Amino acid sequence: MSAIEAEGLVKTFDKGKVRALDGVDMVAREGTIFGLLGPNGAGKTTAIRVLSTLLMPDAGRASVGGYDVVRQPEQVRRIIGLTGQYAAVDELLSGQDNLFMIGRLLGIDASEARSRARELLVAFELADAATKFVKTYSGGMRRRLDLAASLVGRPRFLYLDEPTTGLDPRSRLELWGMIRSLVAEGTTVLLTTQYLEEADKLADEIVVIDHGRVIAAGTPAQLKTRVGGHVLQAQPADPADLPATEKVLAGLARDGDEPYTDGQLVSVRIDDRAALGQAVRRLDEEGIAIDDLSLRRPSLDEVFLTITGHLAEGEQDIQDEQERSRR
Amino acid sequence: MSAATLSPAGGTNVITNTLTIARRNLLHIKATPEQLVEMSIQPLMFLVLFVYVFGGAIFDSSREYLQFALPGILVQSVAFLPFTTAIALNVDFQRGVIDRFRSLPIARSAVIGGRILADGARIAWSIAIITGFAALLGFRFRGGVDGGIAAFVLVTAFGLTMCWPMAFIGITARTTESVNTWGFMIILPLTFASSAFVPTESMPGWLEAFANVNPVTAVIDSARELMLGTDVPGNPIVKAVLWMIAIQAVFAPLAIARYRRRV
């Protein structure tokens, strides 16, 4: 049975001027991680909000666990857990009071709600801070509490809307581990992310959306194959050689492709692996000193670039963050 | 963590939901003790300042002025308390807490209902503190216990009424700063251009006209009538009740509609 299904979802804002969702179709299977990938403003959050009954679609239909999000919102809310883009926990309550409150709101009786809260606080390594106000928590602790809050009712479907945005790399890895173990226990996860790496590492299947439309779908491997070929990357020792390096690699690019640079590395898509040898020779002839030269399968970044014609926004942020945290 | 993916045991109902949210809002006082100051000490400060600074000038003695001003100070303090409603709702929207509530299988009315229930408790607390302190300063309930209780009920009802327009502002405004601006724009003139601190006859004609139709004046005059056992002309209790009904009839549906529509 398909766990989450959407067909032709349309949602517009500002009296139709902004088409946040412009006919989105997707099918997520039970017990998998389904990745919704796209840049900022692509429509990911809108899709999550429709699937969690927070927004009514203008057209199309969607169901979760067999329940229609428009006609049976109450049933849908009983089987989902939502973790939003911003940690939606109550800052003015303790971690324990947050989880207890959600338990009570879900109709769990007081003593059971209390023990469930304790269980989750331990599982998410928050037991020491259980009675502290959330306003004193770090970003990573808030995210973990937010995730715990969405799990109080043991939802079959867990929606994670950019769960690791703004987290340091270590907290991000920890959260990934927690998500994987939930799936191992049978939860179906719908994950939105602007980080290609995250979708690549976590998702069983991915839908790429941009401007409210699905522009690609498949497993990470399928998406990479779809782009095909290899990527040749060269890093000149002196950044002043970047233009010259680009010029050399342009001569090796596969038809219709051009090299691009992030300010350190020059990347180009090639059809033939023999290009690596040619690159070495030509760079040498030009007298360009190279620190790093590599050949690899395209990453989802390149997939994204190929499909959308622009790099995923936010990808630079993650690099910046990693830079910062390394220092 | 358990692997089970059960639905939560038992059903949920509006009353439990509302009480849970009310409890949550009252627990916030623990994290923000300044709320307690706002609910308890600030009104007492007002009481002391007004009575002893203006009392002698406006009336023959501070003691007589205390009798006159207490109902006004009471209503003014209560009129300011719903600010917390507005700001808290605004923050809940901004922080995504409302999204979390909405994604849960709970009655939607419970969020606003719980808010107002908690505010009712805060208002009752404030009234008790202020009247208790005023009694220590020498305020006498010349209208008897019944009058006192009736005034207590009426003023609490007024505070709850004011929660609706303030909730509307809290939900509509994008930032807490604009909640503050709009809130003050409304509450400050309403409470000062009223019979709270001076008899309205002492005001210039245009202001007196405003003060006389001001719902706050009606509530204060009613409280005076009930607490002091005097007869205030113009049927203030009828006016006050009609005003409260009118304010709720306009702002409760507006606030709820905004709450439903805000995304």
Image (cartoon, coloured by chain):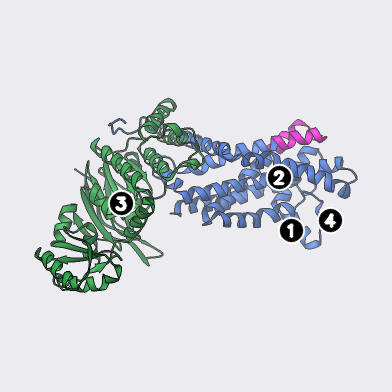
Q: Marks 3 and 2: which is nearer the front? A: 3
Q: Residue at x 29, y 64 (%)?
A: A264
- Residue A24 shows up from this direction: no
Residue at mark 3 shares a chain with residue at mark 4 = no
Disc 3/disc 1 C-alpha distance (Å): 55 Å
Q: Position of residue B241 (x, y in %)?
A: 67, 45
- Tell me what residue is drawn at x 32 percent, y 38 percent: A155
Residue type for callout 1? Phe
Closest to the observer: B220 or A30? A30
In the rendered view of the protein, which quadrant contains the N terminus of chain B? top left
Q: Which residue is mark 1?
A: B210
Marks 2 and 1 on same chain: yes
Cα separation, mark 3 vs mark 2, equals: 50 Å
Circle 2 sits on which residue? B75
According to the image, label 4 marks what residue? B202
Give the number of the mark in front: 4 or 1: 4
Q: Nearer the viewer, mark 2 or mark 1?
A: 2
Q: Position of residue A142 (x, y in %)?
A: 42, 42
Chain letter for the blue colouring in the rendering: B
Residue depth check, mark 3 versus mark 1: number of the one nearer the observer: 3
Q: Are marks 4 and 2 on the same chain?
A: yes
Q: Which residue is mark 3?
A: A192
Which one is earlier in the sequence, the residue at label 4 or at label 2? Answer: 2
* Residue extent of the magenta highlight: B128-152
* Mark 1 residue element: helix
Is disc 4 in contact with disc 1, using a CB cutoff of under 8 Å?
no
Q: Which of A191/B220 is in front?
A: A191
The chain identifier of the residue carrying mark 4 reads: B
Crowd around label 1: few <14 · some 14–19 · many ≥20 (10 Å): some
